Image (cartoon, rainbow, N blue to C red):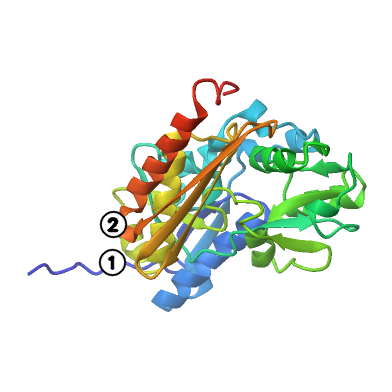
Amino acid sequence: MTIETPITLPSPDAPLKIGTRGSPLALAQAHETRDRLAAHFDLPAEAFEIVVIKTTGDDRAMIAADRPLKEIGNKGLFTKEIEEQLLSGGIDIAVHSMKDMPTEQPEGLILDCYLPREDVRDCFISPAHSAIAELPEGTVVGTSSLRRRAQLLHRRPDLQVVEFRGNVQTRLKKLEDGVAACSFLAMAGLNRMNMTGEHMTPIDPEDMLPAVAQGAIGIERRTADGRAAAMLDAIHDRPTQARLDAERSFLRTLDGSCETPIAGLALLDGDTLWLRGEILRPDGTEALSGERRGPIAEGARMGADLARELLERAGEGFFAWK
């Protein structure tokens, strides 16, 4: 019989340090993580310390200049500095938006805790229009997402899409200033910051398949940290893990990054998992999609299998821009 050794819980005198980016959304996600841990272990909020870490992707000059992410780096530009702090012991756990996360973690780190997933849908934001179909020909649309750009141009090649970077507040201000007539954000972020309201319309996944892992929060830890492992296991949401196992396997097999327009969404129905995936050319001239249904336990295999099918259908040169 195995006897588990009790873990030493954090306290106000020796708090658990939670690393995060400094945007309002990132802080909201870190506070949700703290609150779930505090509630489960009956600890005061002071037993946790939120540590803000600036990442390459948070550089204000690059945001203000609306430089495309692909010019700065890949998905790691939102995680590298945080993971360095985690490896060095500067923080104990790191909270991430899962759609920002590379599919592989640095040696010594593991990502095996997900919070319950929020709304996966994209949100159409415009003071004057309520849907993409309503936009007049030639309308200027702002987005920093290569996926959304490709999906938009595939449906509406007449639109003019411009780069639109920054956190939620920055992008909404750009809309107010008339930089573009409309933009898009994830419903999950708007919900987490209680910012939903007029001029914001959710888009059905059938009309715009979301990014892989959109709406999911992941919590990273050091592989050898048994205390963090035990605490995070207590708040881990297994249905979200099942869905992300399929989606991230799909992304991993495609070798996806911020330079690749890829969409994917897995849903659970009883013991069955339904996975849809899509790859597009950046200019929207071609889009390929497919799906798989099967047992939840087969999600990762289905994700890889669907990716291989789309790669075969795409043929040589489809990803030539990478």
| Rendered image quadrant of residue 234 | bottom left
User: Which residue is farthest front?
Assistant: 313
Is residue 14 visible in the rendered image? The answer is no
Q: Please, what is the three-letter code of the amino acid marked with disc 2?
A: Gly
Q: Where residue 145 appears, x then y in whole percent? A: 67, 41
* Tag 1 residue: 7
Q: Secondary structure at mark 1?
A: loop
Picture coordinates of residue 237 (x, y %)?
A: 41, 66
Mark 1 surroundings within 10 Å by alpha-carbon count, few (fewer than 14), some (14 through 19), many (20 or more): few
Question: Label 2 to label 1, Cα distance in Å?
Answer: 8 Å
| Amino acid type, callout 1 | Ile
**Image quarter (top left, top right, bottom left or bottom right) of the C terminus:** top right
Count of numbered badges drawn on the protein: 2
| Structural crowding at the residue carrying mark 2, measured as other residues with C-alpha within 10 Å and reported as few (<14), some (14–19) or many (≥20) | few
Taking the spot 71% from the left edge, 58% from the top edge, the residue there is 123
**In the image, what residue occupies the spot 68% across and 34% down?**
284
Give the numbered dot on residue 103: none
Q: Residue at x 34, y 67 (%)?
A: 271
Q: Which residue is mark 2?
A: 226
Q: Is residue 322 left or right of residue 8?
A: right
Dot 2 and dot 1 residues touching (CB under 8 Å): yes
Q: Is residue 141 visible?
A: yes
- Point out residue 244 in the picture as x, y percentages from the top left corner: 44, 53
